Image (tube, rainbow, N blue to C red):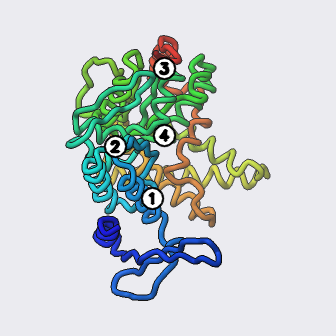
Amino acid sequence: MPILSRSTKAYFDVTLLPPEYLPERGEITMAYSEGDRNKPLDIAASGRGLQQMLLLLTYLYTHPDAVLLLDEPDAHLEIIRQRDIYNLLAETAQAQRAQVLIASHSEVLLEEAASRGLVIAFLGKQPRRLNKREQLRKAPRDIPANHYYQAARKGWVLYVEGATDLSILRAWARRLEHPVARFLDGVFVHYIQGNKPQTARDHFYGLREAYPELLGIAIFDRLKEQPAAEQLKILMWQRREIENYLCSRETLLAFARANPPDATEPSLVAQRVRVMEQQIERLEQAFSAQRKPSPWSADIKATDEFLDPLFENYYEALGLANQMRKANYHLLADYVPLAEIAPEARTMLDAILDVAQRAKTDLE
């Protein structure tokens, strides 16, 4: 079939060799050669992408007026070939008066289909016709399919900057015996790196295209401006970042007393506490000498400016490798004295509870 040979040569740089019939075995064998090499190779040795496209194109060429249902035809193709192969399929189907229905999560295929085909997105329980290029980009890239499932199951979504923020909220809810604790276990959470409210909005309102009754709450580190009221409830901490609420002398000394938990010999505990006090004092003096705000200030970036150098110096003075880095600072939430847990923490937990209780599950 000359047209099939031309297509495979153009798109895969593969030359199809004439099939051979083996009468003694009653079989037809097919071979190909790659590039400029003449050595024949069995078609079974070719890549899955080539085999799949050969099958599809052969069917279209031999079955005009057909309706072909394809599930992820791009699955075995490199991204750089997906656009070309889609166009080849579309052109072949048009020439053969066939219809091709494709199920795909490929952003490349969806963008290409936006200009020449009909795109249907199954969002929630109602299929929707998408005719905006931005909607097509958002579907596979920004909102995975499992997020729609979680939205329907939970009825609300929580946005925080990262997993450590969620761990701190859970620790506070547990220690304060706050009723939101049960909602934070198994919560539908989406992490927004970079403290950008617009990223949360894009995700939230994308989900609401499928579930208009979806509720959401986003809690960010301090923002430059107070967010305006909208369907997505956006709150921010008054201190520079959530870790600032873990920075107090008593919290750090409590951590030193308890870690490592299996080292309870009084002299070793006393040593850890003494070293922690020394390192805190050194940093306080350094901040003062540099005319920087106090380490306990609400305006410093607690993780980078205080906790990072504190724990680096603390473990070095103990002759140990640093066991507390930024990803572990959420552990300090368990050592904040109950009396020192900021009232703002309860306010945030109350706001989350309000959204969780108002949410409708299994949205229609």
Which residue is tagged 3? 155
The image quarter containing residue 225 is top left
Which residue is tagged 1? 55
Crowding at mark 1 (Cα within 10 Å: few <14, some 14-19, many 20+): few
Q: Are marks 2 and 1 in contact (CB under 8 Å)?
A: no
Left or right of 253: which side holds 7? left
C-alpha gap between disc 4 and disc 2: 71 Å
C-alpha gap between disc 1 and disc 3: 43 Å
Residue 193 location, x and y as percent?
38, 44
C-alpha gap between disc 1 and disc 4: 64 Å
Disc on the earlier residue, 2 or 1? 1
Q: Are marks 4 and 2 in contact (CB under 8 Å)?
A: no
Kindly give the residue lying farthest to the top in the view shown.
358
Q: Nearer the viewer, mark 3 or mark 2?
A: 2
Q: Image point 56% across, 49% down: which residue? A: 277
The answer to whether 125 is drawn above or below residue 23 in the figure is above
Disc on the earlier residue, 1 or 4? 1
Q: Which three-letter amino acid code belongs to the residue tagged 2?
A: Asp
Q: Image point 49% across, 64% down: which residue? A: 48
Q: Which three-letter amino acid code belongs to the residue tagged 4?
A: Cys
Disc on the earlier residue, 1 or 3? 1
The answer to whether 291 is drawn above or below residue 239 in the figure is below
Q: Which mark is residue 247?
A: 4
Tally of numbered tags:
4
Q: Check disc 2 and report its element: helix, strand or loop.
A: loop
Crowding at mark 4 (Cα within 10 Å: few <14, some 14-19, many 20+): many
Residue 354 location, x and y as percent?
47, 13
Crowding at mark 3 (Cα within 10 Å: few <14, some 14-19, many 20+): many
Residue 218 location, x and y as percent?
39, 28
